[in-house]
Amino acid sequence: MAKGEGAESVSTAGLLQPSILKQEDLIRPKRESKGKLSISSKVCYAIGGAPYQITGCALGFFLQIYLLDVAQLDPFYASIILFVGRAWDAVTDPVVGFFISKTSWSRFGRLMPWIIFSTPFAVTSYILIWFVPDIARGQVMWYLFFYCIFQTLVTCFHVPYSALTMFISREQSERDSATAYRMTVEVLGTVLGTAIQGQIVGKVDTPCIADPLLLDIGNTSSVAMEDVNITRDTGSLTDTKNAYMIAAGVISGIYIICAAILSVGVRERRESSELQSDEPVSFFQGLKLVMNHGPYIKLIAGFLFTSLAFMLLEGNFALFCTYTLGFRNEFQNILLAIMLSATLTIPFWQWFLTRFGKKTAVYIGISSATPFLLLVVIMESNLIVTYMVAVAAGISVAAAFLLPWSMLPDVIDDFNLQHPDSTGHEAIFFSFYVFFTKFASGVSLGISTLSLDFAGYKTRGCSQPEEVKLTLKMLVSAAPVVLIVFGLLLFKLYPIDEDKRRKNKKALQDLRDEESNSSTESDSTELASIV
């Protein structure tokens, strides 16, 4: 195209030099403009992060209750499904990252085909998770199979979507801005997932299970009460099953809409992840290089501990509010306060990290919740204090959401400078970070379950022993504070500060300008040859 236009515009040798200058002037602004993202592109990119958060939130909050109370599985088998599903989910991330690294570029891009083609199968498997099959045996395998299948397919969506950050723009500021948009939508997704699932399922009257001690008053009254409960269970359970299916259908529809907006509104730019190589990427060589890259290891080590802290808080806060603080009817509103606080403060943290630096944002943002976590345990049960803790926790959750995805591109830029001949490893960086995050989630789930079991937790009990209340205090206060402090100490070793980041940015820009000038000179030589 450039050569043809140049040939048509030049008629004599005397006009050759001005036309070459015009060609260069046209090429350079065009290349520079490719790094800028429009607001609509950032919004479309951000919307693509909603499906993972909406489905993950719905499964995280409601799957265990669903398996026990609706599917009526034995708690032992329900635990197997949850643990195996989490473990499988963690394993699939590096596996999918491997296959993405071997994927060739197509006219749709390198990552976008994974997102497009995984969506219909992921939606189907998600709906089947919330379906109660009419089979006497095999329910455990049904839920285990479709839970693992969905985790695999949603990984095929989320890992390439996470790596897409490096392919939407070459400018760090634009990537950071797009990441802020994305984190805002993802936190909104957690609110939306909780609201949709909770409101639809919550409209159905869940059958009341009477205390066994009350049923032993007399044989006659016990039998009569049991008949009443069975009659109520039959109708209520059918309505509850239908409610879960309706919620699954609504969430699946949102999943499809978000995937369509992402695929239509975002263009994957091959030149944004320069320097690129047309040679096939060796996954295992790339993995070795990535795992030997010091800044990456220090970054994920720090966030591993801070993520574990917030996951302990997230997984046990509802139980803590219900049994330790006694706010059985308020915990849903308290959780909503956490999510809304996180959503509203993400723009603030985006401004803060650009103004004061990312490492400063890590120290202040993640540590801001620790005084409130200690306060809620030290003071007597107080609803106002609990809401204050929820808001403070949401502020820290926003920082914990935003900062890892904002700092990972900096690590990748540093890696590309140190290994300019080894490119195409973006999926490895992101997939193994997600792997370690999910590993932390599995560890937190295991620690919580075992701790409560050792403390004598009573399933579906109206109250819990003092040992359980003390354990819940440790899980939502002492343990998260210790993990946050340890994680922040590890961040002291993270070498990429603002000065280092600016130097890396300048060095990368110099390399890109050098390649652009080389490409322009080549085009000009070909143009002169044609003229």
Image (cartoon, grey):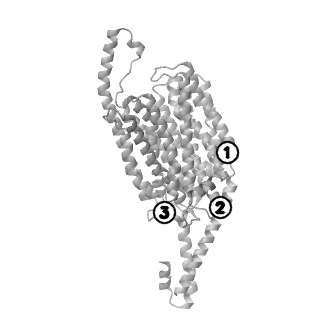
Residue 390 in sight: no
Residue at the extreme front: 137
**Around disc 2, counting alpha carbons within 10 Å, would you say few (fewer than 14), some (14 to 19), or many (20 or more)?**
some
Residue 79 in sight: yes
Q: Report which residue position mark 1 lands on.
A: 491
Q: What element carries label 1?
A: helix
**Around disc 1, counting alpha carbons within 10 Å, would you say few (fewer than 14), some (14 to 19), or many (20 or more)?**
many
Three-letter amino acid code of the residue under disc 3: Ser
> Residue 66, how many percent across, how many down?
40, 32
**92, 108: nearer the viewer:** 92
Q: What element carries label 3?
A: loop
Three-letter amino acid code of the residue under disc 2: Leu
- Compared to residue 518, the image places residue 41 above or below, namely above
The residue at the point 59 percent across, 50 percent down is 351
Q: Report which residue position mark 3 lands on.
A: 104
Residue 417 bears which disc, if any? Answer: 2
Label 3 – label 2 distance at C-alpha:
23 Å
Do the residues under discs 3 and 1 have CB atoms within 8 angstroms? no
> Residue 302, how many percent across, how many down?
64, 43
